[in-house]
Image (cartoon, grey):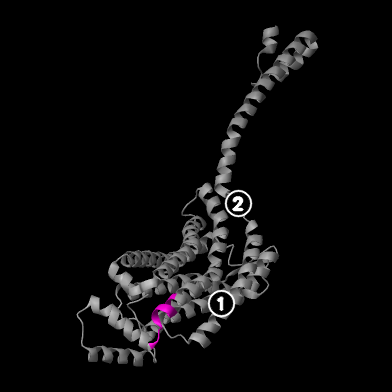
Amino acid sequence: MTHSILSPIGGKHFLPVLSLRVLNPAASRHLEKKSMGDRRFIDFQFQDLNSSLRPRLGNATANNTCIIDDSFKYNLNGAVYSVVFILGLITNSASLFVFCFRMKMRSETAIFITNLALSDLLFVCTLPFKIFYNFNRHWPFGDTLCKISGTAFLTNIYGSMLFLTCISVDRFLAIVYPFRSRTIRTRRNSAIVCAGVWIIVLSGGISASLFSTTNVNNATTTCFEGFSKRVWKTYLSKITIFIEVVGFIIPLILNVSCSSVVLKTLRKPATLSQIGTNKKKVLKMITVHMAVFVVCFVPYNSVLFLYALVRSQAITNCLLERFAKIMYPITLCLATLNCCFDPFIYYFTLESFQKSFYINTHIRMESLFKTETPLTTKPSLPAIQEEVSNQTTHNGGELMLESTF
């Protein structure tokens, strides 16, 4: 009878237990304890299963969302922008004054450097708005001023790289091809090249600001951040590729190639006899030039490419996303510091150019007889005098000796 009572009814065991409490209390308590033990064992098994699955499910969720706190960038950007604003405003304003009113842009390189300083100064003038935004984490100045600020930043970063490349190419022509480059290295051609650079960088900067650059979230307005995946994938990623190729990869190749050839040319005895004591200054100029390029622009553009891939979700790895979002503001600050480092390029470049290119007429005549005779077939004196006269007329009374640097 006991077995018949304990047999399951409808697949449930609690009814036989209730019936046994009436018929046999001792047996009922024994079976109740056994049933509770079975339930505890089953609960323990489920808990163990859940604990083994929970880390995997947590990682999957973290990988899908990949929440990263990069709020440190606001204080970092605000502090760096403040320093750049003070130093950049003073040095670039003074440099432009010297270029325009003292030197009067008498050489091709002075034209490139003047445009570089102008690009730095325009960007520096927009920094107070960025400083306010980063310290307050709110942009109250409207979408138009946000577009101008973003365009000024892109114009400065890639304009600086392109103008530095122009200086490097000009130095390459002056040292490696001092005579054949005379018809190319003119102030008119330099002005045309500078106009082309401005068109390129302004096109890239304005195209990145055609859409709405401000976003409102919880009564807080952001400027040039917080764009959706769709905007990055369909629009910003394409602009990034364009500015990376035109504004970074091509200038990097040209800078490295020109500097390498110049250094190789400086080792030749014929070149040493032409440049005389200015070799060390040229080496310093190349060193400062490449240092600014490598420190300021290479890290930023390398991380920017990875950052664009992460934001457009072409890469979904959480580790790479964390690296890109943390390193991007740091390299952005390094790129901004170029406004403070560029005056060193002004100093070394113009000092070398002034002492190597602009010399008095009687010293120039003596240098022409000394440097050109061993390198070429000795021309007649009237021919040399005619060439000197033509160069003097072309350069406004001052001859640029392109065989020395």
Cα separation, mark 1 vs mark 2, equals 37 Å
Q: Residue at x 55, y 61 (%)?
A: 228
In the displayed structure image, the side of residue 221 where residue 401 appears, left or right = left
Query: Which is more toward the observer, 344 or 250?
Result: 344
Mark 1 residue type: Asn
Q: Residue at x 59, y 30 (%)?
A: 52
- Region of the chain picked out in magenta, as a range: 352-360
In the displayed structure image, the side of residue 72 where residue 347 appears, left or right = left
Q: According to the image, label 2 marks what residue?
A: 68
The quadrant of the image that shows the C terminus is bottom left
Q: Residue at x 53, y 83 (%)?
A: 98
Q: Earlier in the sequence, mark 1 or mark 2?
A: 2
Residue 319: x %, y % from top left: 53, 47
Residue 105: x %, y % from top left: 46, 85
Residue 126 is one of the magenta-drawn residues: no
The quadrant of the image that shows the N terminus is top right
Q: According to the image, label 1 marks what residue?
A: 92
Mark 2 residue type: Ile
Q: Quadrant of residue 362?
A: bottom left
Instruction: Using the image, determine if residue 124 lies above or below residue 9.
Output: below
Query: Which is more toward the observer, 303 or 242?
Result: 303
